[in-house]
Image (cartoon, helix red, strand yellow):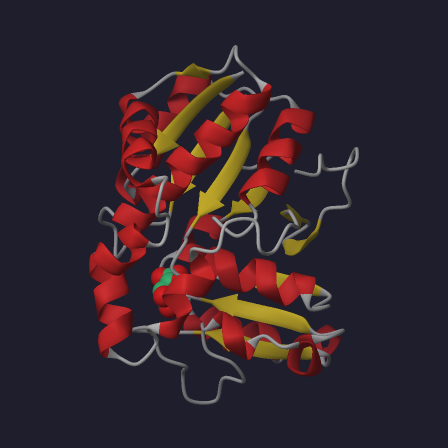
Amino acid sequence: MHIAVNLVPGTLARELSLFEGGPVTYVVVDILRASTVICTALSHGAESVIPVGDIEAARVLLGRTDMRNAMLCGERGGRKLDGFDLGNSPAEYTTEKVGGRTLIFASTNGSVALTAAPRDATVLVGGLVNVSALAHSIVQHDQPVLIACAGKENGFSLEDAVGAGAIISKLWETDPELELVNDGARAAQVLWDQYKSDPVMPLWQSQHGIYLIEIGFGADLSVCGAIDSVPIVPILRDGRIVAEPPISPFPQN
Ligand code: MLT
């Protein structure tokens, strides 16, 4: 299996071209916090999550007659928006709040990376909280893989690169033939080796982690860094992210 990592959003087209237009599994990684929120919401019974590129699109979508069951979720600057039901802290996404609901989700970077997914790709959501289940699904899909780090406002995010490295390392356990086809993948692997003994550490050291602490969301960092705590695989189908039923049982540790 071939794998590349796009470390910053602006180079997506270049890294995708490595696969020459063939089928890919496109994995969006936004460790702090969109990936973690999506996994948490689906594991707590949300029917689906609809990623949108901006706030206006979210409000327009909510107005549609088939969206009566929907809630507005997401953030700007890490904080819940006026008129939105939920922000972007995994702790908000309880069964009571999201069970059976459709979530229209607009975040600064994560939902944008999801809406940038290539047509026809298999689109998955990856975090540290679901890394083993995700790796299992990637192997089952058996396609070249592009991990798209959501980053921060078009720039590099340490925690997303480390998360990409965690996925590579997990894939290696089942696929010794795994081939890293770009420098992003090589860099992510080195970063994961550096941090694997304490996966929460890069979240504390990252610019976005420091910012979240400053605005009162420090508790989210250990939630987002808890390896395999939410073992589900979010997959995009017809514009909606749902929990992928396992293609074959996830191996238990
Ligand atoms: C994003 O999508 O930019 C993030 O999830 C931001 C956040 O931590 O709220």
Q: Residue 119, relative to residue 61: is it above or below?
A: above
Would you say 220 lies left or right of 244 here? Answer: left
Q: Nearer the viewer, residue 220 or 104?
A: 220
Whether 186 is drawn above or below 242: the answer is above
Residue at 66% x, 62% y: name it: 42
Q: Quadrant of residue 124 in the image? A: top right
Q: Quadrant of residue 85?
A: bottom right
Residue 116: give x, y in percent of width and height. 45, 46
Q: Residue furthest bottom?
A: 83
Q: Is residue 118 visible?
A: no
Q: Whereabouts is ligand 1, in terms of quadrant?
A: bottom left
**Residue lying at 67% horizontally and 27% vertically, measured from the top left:** 141
Q: Quick check: 102 left or right of 60? A: right
Q: Eyeballing the image, is 193 above or below 105?
A: above
- Pick the front one: 199 or 22: 199
Q: Percent from the top left, x then y, of residue 49?
A: 62, 63
Give how far across and how far down residue 32 sits, in percent: 38, 59
Q: Position of residue 225 (x, y in %)?
A: 42, 55
Relative depth, front residue between 124 and 170:
170
Q: Quadrant of residue 173?
A: top right
Q: Quadrant of the C terminus?
A: top right
- 163 displayed left or right of 92: left
